[in-house]
Amino acid sequence: MNVDWHLRYQQQSYWTRSLRQYLLQRVSIHPTSNVLEVGCGTGVICSDLLDHFPCHLFGIDIVFSNIDIAMRNVSKLCAICGDANFLPFPSGFFEMVYCHYFLLWLANPLQVIAEIKRVLRPGGFFLIFAEPDHSARIDFPSALNPLGKLQVSSLKIQGADIQIGRKIPGLLSKAGFHDIQYGISGFESCSGSLPDWWESEWEVIRHDLKSIVSDDRLNNYQDLDKKCWEAGTRILWVPTFYAIAIN
């Protein structure tokens, strides 16, 4: 099964929309402000930001196909295919930089955060909208614990830092940011029905586990997962950190 990554990014953006709006109200964004999303993907967050905060918005992503989609989806976005370890911008160029489910995929997040600090003007803001801590994932009922552990193991194999969320305050401090504030997002789920992101979640699960788990076993997990959601007994929670810091 192929994953529709644009749809997946849209689902992730829904989870964090209210938090993003709260954090963005704490910074000053004007039509003349230069703003950057690092790891912009297909432009989902960029589009949402421009709807509420007109500005000179830039995005960078290392995957060209993401940039291609982002440029078609967000006409006012200046999108660049490039490496966040070496941001192609002059020092002090941006009033704000942000990221969303991005740092967990980096081999050296401190280097990227240092680059983000370099391109921010003094007094500029770095907003981290969402970075998960998969090592503290909660699955209930216990029959679904193995599914969670398999998915976390797959993320590690793919190169994700499964504890990136809890590392954020220390990384920001080491990079030289100040006035660092952080917390854990509170995602709400409705009991007794399938979440609207359930099918998207299972696309990703099958993508992550297809080489290590048989189809029959995955089908059994999916059936059980669905029954538990519909019965109101399913808990799936991954602590997801956010932060705001000043250069």
Image (cartoon, rainbow, N blue to C red):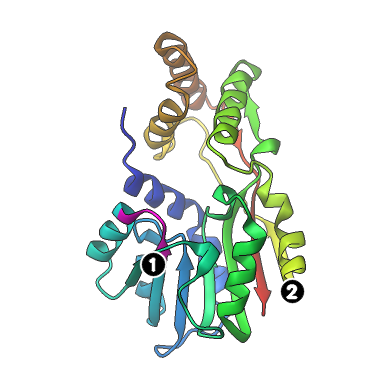
13, 175: nearer the viewer = 175
Where residue 122 sits, quadrant-wise, is bottom right
- Residue lying farthest bottom? 32
Q: Which residues are magenta?
A: 60-64
Q: How far across and down, in percent of the image, does residue 80 sit? A: 36, 68
- What residue type is disc 1 on? Cys
Residue 158 — which label? none
Quarter in which the C terminus is drawn:
bottom right
From the viewer's side, name the closer residue of 186 and 175.
Answer: 175
- Locate residue 32, reporting x and y percent: 41, 90
Q: Nearer the viewer, residue 46 or 52?
A: 46
Q: Label 1: state its secondary structure.
A: helix
Residue 163, above or below 183: above
Where does the image place residue 65, in percent across and percent down from the top left? Answer: 29, 52
Q: For numbered disc 2, what is the local secondary structure?
A: loop
Q: Which residue position holds label 1? A: 46
The reply to whether residue 40 is visible in this rendering is: yes
Amino acid beneath label 2: Gly
Q: Quadrant of residue 144?
A: top right
- For label 2, the crowd category at 10 Å Cα-Cα, with few meaning under 14, some 14 to 19 and many 20 or more, is few
Q: Residue at x 45, y 83 (%)?
A: 34
